[in-house]
Amino acid sequence: EQAEHGATTDVHPGSAPQAVGPPLLVLRGVDKHFGELHVLQDVDLTVGKGEVVVVLGPSGSGKSTLCRVINRLETIGSGSITIDGQELPEEGKGLAQLRADVGMVFQSFNLFAHKTVLENVTLGPMKVRKVPASQARERARELLRRVGVESQADKYPAQLSGGQQQRVAIARALAMEPKIILFDEPTSALDPEMVTEVLDVMVSLARAGMTMVVVTHEMGFARRAANRVVFMADGKVVEEGDPESFFTAPRTARAQDFLSKIL
Ligand code: ADP
Ligand code: MG
């Protein structure tokens, strides 16, 4: 995988990947209201191929809504969202296809409780991508190995630790071969000792060139893997920059205030 990205990818421990390709996800002037609440205000965001963007900001600033509009779990009021040059349609077959290109990993794992780990990973590819069962199972085992839970394949989610469940959720997202994966506070519901095992998987994905938007307050992850940090407050992108500058010298009062509370 290193060879794939050649000399432009910096794989030294502690430094972020450098390879950022052409725009993959583009949000322009995205606005959304929930009734009176202006939850997203004129949001512009461009994520390049292979780029890892960490989104942070206070609770209620619109981070989850941002993730949800990107795969149309929520509609937008105005503005546009394009993935790989294609505008997200409101509904229909095109939407299902585009949605399949956007993986999503939630805080609460959201695995199918009544399906085995292996079934959780094969279901999407078989249903949406029409991959034959034997091929889907083979690929699923490979992905479960990649995230370190291959020995859990025949268990049910409830029999796994939170960290293992979240790694299965990542394997499930990868199984769809998405162009981009959105992570919404993937480690917030985990016991502290399980946070690292999930972040390590995410760092390895980042280094392998996956395009990722990650809502997290894990500074360590941002420093190890992010190309860029985007800080949101009150539905707006207030500040963005490289992780090191953002964490050591935030420019806006809002970001300074936020960091003083979480650092
Ligand atoms: P964050 O993820 O940054 O904490 P959210 O995107 O979840 O923020 O929420 C932003 C604001 O929108 C909050 O004030 C929240 O209460 C509100 N909100 C989120 N989802 C809905 C909804 N479905 N209906 C009404 N208000 C919502
Ligand atoms: Mg949220």
Image (spheres, helix red, strand yellow):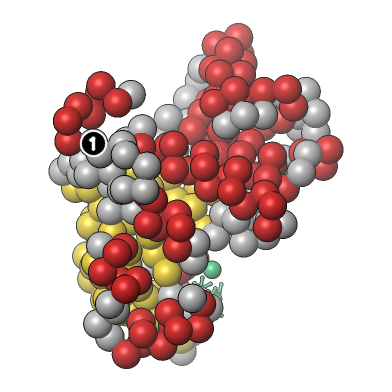
Q: Position of residue 43 (x, y in %)?
A: 28, 71
Q: Is residue 235 left or right of residue 151?
A: left
Q: Is residue 110 left or right of residue 136?
A: right
The residue at 25%/23% (across/down) is 4
Q: Is mark 1 within 8 Å of ligand 2?
A: no
Please identify the residue farthest to the right as the structure is shown. Answer: 159
SS type, badge 1: loop
Q: Position of residue 171 (x, y in %)?
A: 56, 33
Q: Which residue is mark 1?
A: 9
Whether residue 206 is visible, yes or no, is yes
Please identify the residue farthest to the front as the structure is shown. Answer: 13
The residue at 37%/42% (across/down) is 13
The residue at 49%/53% (across/down) is 183
Looking at the figure, which quarter contains the N terminus? top left
Does residue 1 lie above or below 216 as drawn? Answer: above
Does residue 154 lie above or below 187 as drawn? Answer: above
Quarter of the view holding residue 222: bottom left
How would you rate the neighbour count of disc 1 (Cα within 10 Å): few for under 14, some for 14-19, many for 20 or more? some
- 216 or 70, which lies in front? 216
Whether residue 73 is visible, yes or no, is no
